[in-house]
Image (tube, grey):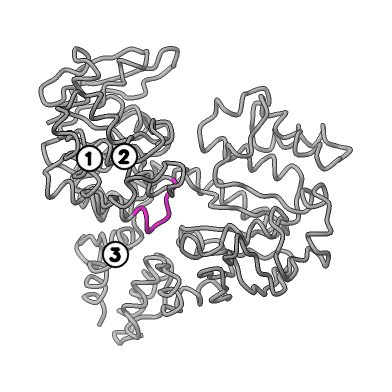
Amino acid sequence: MIQFENVTLTYGGAAAVRDLNFTVAPGEFVAVIGANGAGKTTVSKLMNGLLKPTSGRVLLDGVPTTALRTSVLARKIGFLFQNPDRQLCKPTIREEIAFGLALTGRKDAAARTEAVLREFGFDGSRDPFSASRGERQRIALASLIAVEPEVLILDEPTTGLDYRECMAMMARVQSLNAAGTTVVMVCHDMELVLDFARRTLVLKDGTLLLDGETRSVFRNTDVLRRASVLPPQITRLSLRLGDRLQPADTVEEMEAAIRAARQKGVPA
Amino acid sequence: MIEMRAFSFRYAGADRDALSNLNMTVDDGDFIGVIGPSGAGKTTLTQALSGLVPHRRSGDFFGSVTVNGLDTVNSSLTELALHVGSVFQDIDSQMIAGQVEDEILFGLENFGVDRAEIPRRVDKALADIGISPLRHRTIDSLSGGQKQKVAIAAILALRPKILVLDEPTGELDPGASEQIFRLLRRMNETHGMTVIVVEQKIMLLSAYAKKLAVLNDGVLELFGPVREVLRHSARLEEIGVHCPRVATLSNRLADLTGGALAVDLDEAEALVRGLLP
């Protein structure tokens, strides 16, 4: 459980985030969206304790992040950077995965490392930096998953990935979520948010404009406009069509709605 | 004009071609989006146009690539650079100077542009890209989108006829990405510059490019006007290229529409309204 209580963080006099209040319950899949500079990355770094609030508190399972040791934070929260190269630091994939485990002091680190290598199909003796961008992102994710964190924070997880790599990454994240891992995803790609996040927080200038179920958030056009966010394409089409068609957010839903409306012969 | 004839390239030590038997003609003033999964050969293609392949990458080169009549194998990189301006994927590795103005001066001085002409070129490049206010800023202080614009301005100052960009929006947010593409469109439309851009965001390519080139495993799978290529949404998904969702929707409704394609929201809205009772 992550709780933000009146959280404000100021950098050199200016507030990066202001008076944030929300709770993320175990097992949720939450997206954080907003324009550049809205405070998305600041929120994610407050969650994992990389940043400490200037005022207010961020609580992890009831304990303020300021009172938690880094090793405890690392065990509870995995943070996937936008650029995997900020995370990877070892000469082989095996050492990379073992490194994160060693930090958390697990007894079964060696066995766990081998299990993760097998699960991802990695050759443990390879140099992570000889792998493609998409592979490096998978290695970074694998080293986080190895620790079995309660919360996974993803900062623009699909940057630089092609569509297939993106879907493979998200499928992995989704199955972790289904198994109980809490996922918080900072993301610019609204179709990804629509497809995977059940709840969405909208930030603007460091304040929380809206917090709700993802699909209803995307239909709140006033708030999204203020946040400089465009809803996904099919949602926008659905909004333009208004009452003429049942609301639809995905290609499949819209196709079904159109076919249903034609069969009935009257506007749905 | 660019012509590739039976062009293949295999990196030294690789067990397959990075690009295999490419036949492709790019006319002056074209705006081509290059898309495909990673490892498809997109970057190799851009480097074949700038001459880095084969001049700086060792491997086996077959067939021919000519740029405005210059055979890239027999021309020097400097000669080619007068025709083809390249913006690399990793712009940080491309930036040489500490300051915006110096970055633009550097190329001009290196290419032996007449000294009297240089100040005008710098002014014009900065103004064209809309970054005159950044002139005296340090590169380090710029956002990702601003850096990308400086990299493009430095190339434009050399007045190449062909501009080649490798994933210029990879690290940018949607607003900054759109700005880069608006800029490319302006260069294409008002200066007649040929633009070839590798990009993963299919929605940007659909909105801005005239043609799409789809690479898969080193092979040019599809090449043609954007609308023609987007008709193949099922094949594109197989390759691992995501279509704009309205295009996929319109392809799925082909039995009702007789095959009309919608590539953007306006077209999709008109199409769906036409289908509703």
Could you tell me which secondary element the residue under label 1 belongs to? helix
Left or right relative to B159: residue B199: right
- The tag earlier along the polypeptide, 3 or 2, is 2
Quarter that holds the N terminus of chain A = bottom right
Q: Amino acid at mark 2?
A: Glu
Query: Are the residues tagged 1 and 2 within 8 Å (C-beta)?
Result: yes
In this rendering, the answer to whether A199 lies above or below A99 is below
Q: Which residue is mark 1?
A: B122
**Numbered range of the magenta stretch:** B171-177
Q: Amino acid at mark 3?
A: Leu
| Front in this rendered view, residue B141 or B226 | B141
Q: Which residue is mark 2?
A: B101
Q: Which residue is mark 3?
A: B253
Left or right relative to B262: residue B240: right
| Front in this rendered view, residue A230 or A142 | A230
Which chain letter goes with mark 1?
Answer: B
